[in-house]
Amino acid sequence: MKILITGGAGFLGSHLSDALLARGDDVTILDVGGDLKVRHNLGNSRFHYVRDSVLHADILESLILKCDLIYHLAAVVGVEHYVGDPYEVLNVNINGTQAVLKLAYKHNRKVVFSSTSEVYGRNPRVPFREDDDRVLGSTRIDRWCYSTSKAAAEHFCFAYHRLGLPVVILRYFNVYGPRLDKIDVGRVITIFMGQVLRGDPVTVIGDGSQTRCFTYIDDAIRATVEAGMNDRAVGEIFNVGSDVETSILELAETMIRIAGSPSKIVFVPQVAVYGESYEDVPRRVPWVKRTQEILGVEAETPLEKGLRQTIDWFKAGNGR
Ligand code: UDP
């Protein structure tokens, strides 16, 4: 198959490219970023990197015309962006998705849209079923702009689906692994990674009782590939994640132990890290039955195993 991945040079996109190339597909990625995460594929004749934005309609259209299936992953992701540059988050995530859907509809190409578990916000009732409520804070709190942007984009997906466009929505739950953000930036695992590898204090926000379900990249990619290939997935939302809940304190302790690090844990107030425009999500757990039943995929990599692989990758000097 000829496949277009927007945002294909990012963490998920680079692993998705690997999986599709291994299947024998022809992969084109459209991305504004660098080639750090896809460098190993640049010599492959079935891999094409177009460095541009999804907001450039003419380029986007020429690429959509040449493909059979679109994975729309291009987005501004990461809490530092939600509180640092909400305009860019809203612009790329909403208008970029609209641009992809509009042209996919024009040329009748299936779209798999990467959404997020952030969509559920801080709904206290876990596990989250795909049709559950979204519970968000005030629009004065920038943190919610990401969740809102992805929810608006999901609405666009369903609006186009109603017009006849085949779409699938995937909501990812804290996916991690080699090639996650650069060390010290981005998500909690890369922030802790830098601290643990240097032996610095590990900064647990609040009391560390907040939980996440960390999902190893290979498990997330199996669900992603299947979502593109399986006709029963069309018109559906799927949670993509492990349902094993881990507190942030437990994550810090586990990373310190696995890395054999002398780091100590320090508890820091959230305002000291992200300022006033941040609110935490206390618990985030997916209901995984639909993904198991329709996509036939479940997350099976234990946290310790996934963390070991991730730590080894960063220890080898990658991601700096
Ligand atoms: N976190 C932390 N210390 C840090 C960075 C993050 O304790 O230095 C916590 C954060 O408060 C949240 C969790 O780790 O509860 C996951 O944060 P992340 O930014 O990875 O993404 P989120 O799951 O909140 O979207």
Image (spheres, rainbow, N blue to C red):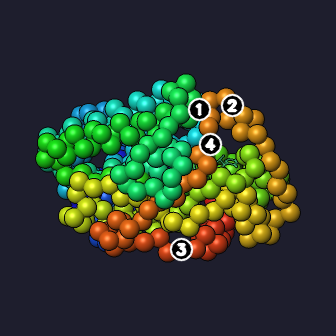
* Residues tagged 1 and 2 counted as in contact (Cβ below 8 A): yes
Q: Position of residue 316 (x, y in %)?
A: 68, 65
Q: Which residue is mark 1?
A: 83
Residue located farthest toward the front when viewing the structure as drawn: 125
Answer above or below: position of 172 versus 74.
below
The label shown at residue 275 is 2
The amino acid type of the residue labelled 3 equals Thr
Residue 233 as seen in the image, left or right of residue 35: left
Residue in view at x 63 percent, y 62 percent: 246
User: From mark 4 to mark 3, how far is it between C-alphas?
Assistant: 26 Å
Residue 150 as seen in the image, left or right of residue 125: left
The amino acid type of the residue labelled 1 equals Val
Q: Which residue is mark 4?
A: 280
One can see residue 210 in this view = yes
Q: Work out which quarter of the rendered image holds the N terminus and state it.
A: bottom left
Q: Position of residue 122 (x, y in %)?
A: 54, 44
Question: CB of residue at label 2: within 8 Å of ligand 1?
Answer: no
- Mark found first going from the N terminus, 2 or 4: 2
* Residues tagged 3 and 2 counted as in contact (Cβ below 8 A): no
Q: Which residue is mark 3?
A: 301
- Mark found first going from the N terminus, 4 or 1: 1
Q: Nearer the viewer, residue 319 or 249?
A: 249
User: From mark 3 to mark 2, how far is it between C-alphas?
Assistant: 34 Å
Residue in view at x 47 percent, y 70 percent: 299
